[in-house]
């Protein structure tokens, strides 16, 4: 079966005063129908930009999608003009987006209801009254109390958690086949985060959407995602089923990420192992391997070529010359 | 030095901070936001107290009251045995040498037009710690090395540093006058995970080296577990549970603490599958109009009719484990 979405060798650059920033540098991944995939990485690694490029939301200029294919249900979306009817139909209609900042991603001068109804009327060609009915329905589904009254509220009248739930309602209202959630809970408190994620997962299950969660929180991925992609400096450095990646990580960066955060269930007193240095400058990337300057296992690596993403297990691939996965590599450098 | 018995360096007793809500042209007081409502806590010398809660629960206000940025509405703050709330204004400066603050946002808390060296050295000048330029310069260099920065960087400006380095400058500034007590207000939350670990390790090393005492205001429960000796959980201006870290994390008694802990995801899919999750309903109520009785009862799954009658007192359930819940 063909995957729902296949991204092939996507490259996005930004032309800045200091030079050309290679924000996304040859990213390829797939997502199947109904699958939940996590994308992890630190800020500035290109994870958001790679997702924005799927629906051509990268601001041009300074951004530019240089090359690549985004095959969604058999059609290459990058072949269409960003403002074509086809792309308008895809955005919100077939691919729903949930953004990080629920305050800034809603328009403050329209009511929540008007904003949800807009996409329903546009994509599903519903009448005003039918759209309103449907909007109340989805707001109820995400647990907004008194949805028929609250629909007339403006975004500032909602709390952060409610706004994010309304955002989920809006993204899912047209039953898109794919939902992209870009840091959906980063701005929220922990209990609200759990609440919002719980609702999002229930909705996704109910509507059989595929979901990409972009986050820097490994815990969220472990809790919800079936597959995980780890990004570093514009590239995917590790990809695989989430249990496999957490148990037998194959890239030193993935291991380092796991070791650098304290866990709620570990023995206390472990010294955290920070990743030395800072993420590389995307204008002037280190030549051989982008992680080499920070890699804790650099001494073991003799290779002078740029590593390719290569398979190390079933559906599990790693962009590293070293063979470290498979031997409970999660316990390495302890 | 005056020191009260059993090494308590800071004691907060029945602290209250209400912010007035004004209305209309005459700015009449129409009500109060009870940001901190009757909290008490003690911190021993050399220890770290983690103060945890969700946004708007009043944890930052507690920190600011201790720093005397805010004047408390009521209550006592005893620092090294002295009640600092009643301290006259001109004595504040001497106090500020001993109590310092590390800010959350390493971007917003540094003056962009001052060089890093001048930021770190400013307080030393104000407090007249060094008598000449040479010793001043040496002291700044010392501080840079202490926090893991190259002293050569002192002439650079904040925008030339990365987030982690800026946080180090903030820490060097806080340490410049040899404080004994540092209020850390979310020092890690603006940093990336790989950098966060560097700063956590740095603060732990400094505590050991310099015998510092920390009030660690944070919302990340796994980080707080990693660095705190004691943990206080706040909800809507009240402390609802306080105990040593092991008790809080292994035997949480207050339903809110249990919900908070279960909401933190563990980066391990196998562990996650087996975990029981408590998903709270609704949102945190407004502190302008808090619910009657226990502040948590409208969201609590164990709530009984009695819970809405009066605010539960902190009771000692087992030694040094205090809980404000009538259902425990």
Image (cartoon, grey):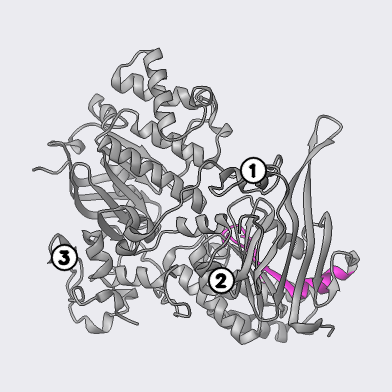
> What residue sits 80% from the left and 37% below the top?
B22
In front: label 3 or label 1: 1
Which residue is disc 2 drawn over? B247
Would you say the residues marked 3 and 2 are in contact, meaning their CB atoms lie under 8 Å apart? Answer: no
> What residue sits 40% from the left and 13% below the top?
A129
Q: Give the position of the C terminus of chain B as an image quadrant.
A: bottom right
| Magenta-colored span | B91-119
Label number found at residue A308: 3
In front: A39, or B277? Answer: B277
Distance (Cα) linking label 2 and label 1: 28 Å
Q: In which quarter of the image is residue B30?
A: top right
> What residue sits 61% from the left and 86% below the top?
B209
Magenta run includes residue B101: yes
Q: In this view, does B46 lie above or below A32?
A: below
* Residue B180 image position (x, y, % from top left): 71, 79
Q: Give the position of the N terminus of chain B as an image quadrant.
A: bottom right
Query: Going by the image, does A179 lie left or right of A240?
Result: right
> What residue sits 78% from the left and 55% below the top?
B16
Magenta run includes residue A315: no
């Amino acid at each position: 079966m063909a995957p729902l979405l296949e991204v092939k060798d996507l490259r996005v650059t930004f032309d800045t005063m200091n030079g050309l920033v290679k924000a996304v540098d040859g990213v390829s991944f797939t997502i199947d129908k109904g699958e939940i995939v996590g994308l992890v990485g630190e800020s500035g690694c290109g994870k958001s930009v790679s997702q924005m490029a799927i629906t051509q939301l990268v601001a041009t200029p300074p951004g530019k999608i240089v090359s690549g294919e985004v095959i969604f249900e058999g059609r290459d979306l990058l072949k269409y003009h960003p403002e074509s009817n086809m792309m308008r139909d895809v955005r919100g209609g077939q691919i729903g987006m949930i953004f990080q900042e629920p305050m800034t991603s809603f328009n403050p001068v329209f009511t929540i209801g008007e904003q949800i109804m807009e996409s329903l009327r546009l994509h599903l060609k519903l009448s005003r009254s039918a759209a309103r009915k449907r909007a109340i329905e989805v707001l109820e589904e995400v647990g907004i109390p008194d949805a028929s009254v609250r629909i007339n509220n403006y975004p500032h009248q909602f709390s952060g958690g409610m706004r994010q739930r309304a955002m989920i309602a809006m993204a899912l209202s047209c039953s898109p086949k794919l939902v992209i959630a870009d840091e959906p809970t980063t701005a929220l408190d922990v209990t609200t985060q759990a609440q919002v994620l719980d609702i999002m997962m229930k909705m996704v299950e109910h509507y059989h959407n595929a979901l990409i969660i972009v986050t820097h929180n490994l815990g969220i991925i472990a809790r919800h995602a079936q597959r995980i992609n780890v990004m570093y400096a514009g590239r995917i450095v590790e990809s695989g089923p989430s249990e496999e990646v957490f148990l037998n990580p194959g890239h030193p960066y993935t291991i380092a990420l796991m070791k650098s955060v304290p866990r709620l269930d570990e023995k206390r007193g472990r010294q955290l192992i920070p990743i030395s240095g800072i993420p590389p400058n995307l204008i002037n990337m280190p030549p051989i391997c982008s992680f080499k300057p920070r890699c804790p296992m650099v001494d073991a690596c003799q290779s002078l070529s740029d590593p390719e993403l290569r398979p190390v297990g079933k559906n599990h691939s790693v962009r590293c010359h070293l063979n470290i996965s498979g031997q409970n590599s999660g316990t390495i450098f302890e | 030095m005056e020191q009260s018995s059993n090494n308590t360096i800071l004691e907060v007793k029945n602290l209250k901070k209400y912010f007035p809500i004004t209305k209309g042209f005459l700015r009449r007081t129409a009500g109060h936001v009870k940001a901190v409502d009757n909290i008490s806590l003690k911190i021993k010398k050399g220890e770290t107290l983690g103060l945890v809660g969700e946004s708007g629960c009043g944890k930052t206000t507690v920190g600011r009251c201790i720093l005397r940025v805010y004047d408390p509405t009521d209550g006592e703050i005893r620092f090294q045995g002295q009640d600092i709330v009643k301290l006259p204004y001109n004595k504040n400066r001497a106090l500020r040498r001993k109590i310092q603050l590390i800010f959350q946002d390493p971007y917003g808390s540094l003056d962009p037009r001052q060089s890093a060296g001048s930021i770190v050295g400013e307080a030393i000048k104000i407090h007249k710690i060094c008598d000449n330029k040479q010793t001043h310069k040496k002291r700044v260099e010392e501080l840079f090395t202490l926090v893991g920065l190259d002293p050569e960087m002192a002439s650079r400006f904040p925008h030339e540093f990365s987030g982690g380095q800026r946080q180090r400058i903030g820490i060097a500034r806080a340490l410049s006058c040899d404080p004994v007590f540092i209020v850390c207000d979310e020092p890690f939350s603006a940093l990336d995970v790989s950098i966060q670990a560097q700063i956590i390790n740095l603060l732990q090393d400094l505590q050991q080296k310099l015998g510092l005492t920390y009030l660690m205001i944070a919302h990340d429960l796994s980080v707080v577990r990693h660095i705190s000796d004691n943990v206080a959980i706040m909800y809507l201006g009240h402390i609802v549970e306080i105990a040593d870290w092991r008790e809080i994390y292994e035997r949480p008694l207050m339903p809110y603490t249990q919900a908070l802990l279960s909401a933190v995801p563990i980066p391990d899919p196998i562990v996650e599958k087996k975990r029981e999750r408590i998903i709270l309903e609704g949102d945190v109520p407004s502190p302008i109009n808090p619910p009657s009785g226990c502040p948590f009862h409208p969201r609590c799954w164990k709530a009984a009719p009695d819970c809405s009658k009066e605010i539960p007192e902190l009771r000692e359930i087992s030694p040094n484990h205090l809980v404000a819940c009538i259902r425990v």
